[in-house]
Image (spheres, rainbow, N blue to C red):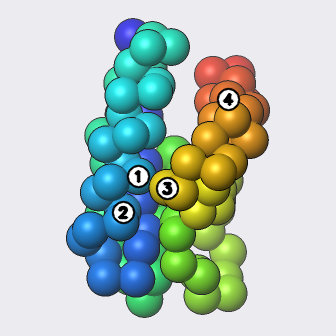
């Protein structure tokens, strides 16, 4: 089982990001991936991402401009349920790229 570290970002750094993280964890386990998630606020995201320990970022609040150095995926549709498939397709693409490393 492949293991990835995900930074999950929302406005407060707790509620929404942990909902997205849990839903993503379940969806990816079915596909043979294990993810560890860290929840954060947008103001912390750039510094955390530049620390180099994350494979990709999901977010439900706008992120500050900057070079995150990893794929960044908008998770609003995944959170609301009105964009699950599009979000998961984008994540599949990110994972396919990561798997090539």
Q: Is residue 89 above or below residue 58?
A: above
Q: Where is residue 4, by image quadrant?
A: top left
Instruction: Residue 48 in the image: state x and y as whole percent.
Output: 40, 71
- Residue at position x 42%, y 74% in the image: 10
Q: Earlier in the sequence, mark 3 or mark 4?
A: 3
Nearer to us: label 3 or label 4? 3
Does residue 43 appear to the left or right of 93 in the view shown?
left
- The residue carrying mark 4 is 92
> Sequence-wise, which precedes: disc 3 or disc 2?
2
Q: CA distance from mark 3 to mark 4?
A: 17 Å
Q: Would you name the residue on which mark 3 appears?
A: 79
Q: CA distance from mark 1 to mark 3?
A: 6 Å
Disc 2, disc 1: CB below 8 Å? yes
Q: Residue at x 67, y 29 (%)?
A: 92
Q: Which residue is mark 1?
A: 20
Residue at 60% in and 82% down: 62
């Amino acid at each position: 089982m492949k293991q990835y570290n995900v930074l999950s970002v929302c406005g407060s750094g707790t509620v929404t990001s942990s909902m997205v993280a849990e839903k993503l964890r379940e969806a990816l386990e079915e596909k043979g991936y294990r993810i560890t998630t860290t929840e954060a606020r947008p103001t912390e995201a750039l510094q955390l991402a530049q620390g180099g320990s994350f494979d990709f970022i999901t977010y439900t609040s706008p992120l500050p401009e900057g070079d995150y150095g990893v794929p960044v995926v908008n998770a609003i549709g995944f959170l609301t349920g009105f964009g699950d498939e599009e979000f998961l397709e984008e994540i599949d693409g990110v994972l396919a790229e990561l798997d090539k490393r």
